[in-house]
Amino acid sequence: MMDLDAYLAERGGEWRRLEVLASRPKLDDPVEVDELVVLYQRAATHLSVLRSRNPDPVMLADLSRLVLAGRAAVTRSSGGFSLRPLADFFAYRLPGALYRTRRWWGTLAVLLVAATAVLIWYMASHPDVLGLFVDDADIDDIAERSFVSYYSEFQSQNFALQVWTNNALLTAQCLAAGVLILPVFYLLWSNMLNTAVIGGVMVSRDAGSTFLTYLAPHGLLEITCLFVGAGVGLRIGWAWIAPGPLLTRQQSLVAWVREGMVVAVGLVPTLAVAGCLEGFVTPSALPAPARIAIGAAVWLAFLAYALLWGREADLRRPTGPESSDLPTA
């Protein structure tokens, strides 16, 4: 026989809050809608517990009525088509996830950009090393023709779709492989080496400005998305290695996989924007400073969204047990 007074004292606050939310004709705040769902699920569990352990008829009747009211309110709040969940995702959940993982993808960005720059300089300064990857004929062809023509070889819309698909696949691979840690570094190394070889070719032929002109408009955002995918993937892998003092390995991994799914969905339209930049802006007839300025403006807007607004979105996360699926950095 359970202590009914103790159980009521422990759960009564949640039941009263559920009654308040269920009595409202409409809930406009997404946080309150989420709270309503959680409290309804808990009340249903409490009702099941009471029925099996302490069938007090008065309390069972009151709690049954409350559960029915909660179910009706949940159905009413979630009924019909609404863009609010989508708006809430892009306004709060995605930027919050980007902000919480900022140390992982930000550190990768700094280290890999620096390493790539060093590799470009080293290959440009050591033709014998560069020759291990491309021969002299290919070097001349890349520097004089194929690097620039690559961006205008296909129609802009087709090229944008192609690079969007390729980059989304690479980023998804980094996210999915993160649980194993090492494959992420292999994917990053392959991408970094390819960029370094092309950059080394262009710099060795005094075409470094052309390399930056054609890389910066889309590359700032595109490569950042790759770093985000790789950083979040590594964070997922770290979740089961070092889950922390409050969660089991399984709980930590599940929480960060959810976070990774949020980021994965959010990177799809972001990479589409990068693909449009690469298909329409990079090969355009605009002056080089204008093309770079467009790419830089879009990139800075993404960073502001992820870091500045992301911090605000993270502060607005739900509090209490219902936020347990939102991990901390």
Image: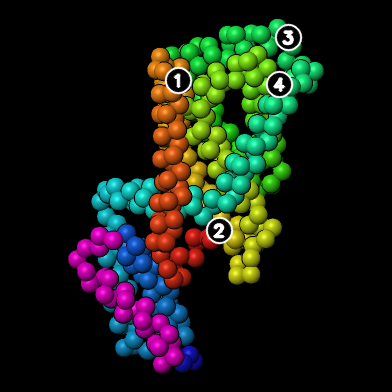
Instruction: Tell me the tag on residue 124.
Output: 4
Looking at the rendered structure, the kind of residue marked 4 is Ala
Closer to the observer: label 1 or label 3?
1
- Residue beneath label 2, please? 329
**Is the C-beta separation of discs 3 and 2 under 8 Å?**
no
x and y percentages locating residue 269 in the rendered image = 42, 36
- Distance from disc 3 to disc 4, alpha carbons, whole Å, reads 13 Å
Instruction: Tell me the tag on residue 190.
Output: none
- Residue beneath label 3, please? 136
Foreground residue, 247 or 141? 141
Does residue 253 lie above or below 38 as drawn? above
Q: Residue at x 49, y 49 (%)?
A: 98
Mark yes or no: residue 257 visible.
no
Q: Residue at x 22, y 72 (%)?
A: 23
- Residue beneath label 1, please? 288
Looking at the rendered structure, the kind of residue marked 3 is Asp
Pick whichever of labels 2 and 1 is earlier in the sequence: 1
Q: Is residue 10 magenta?
A: yes
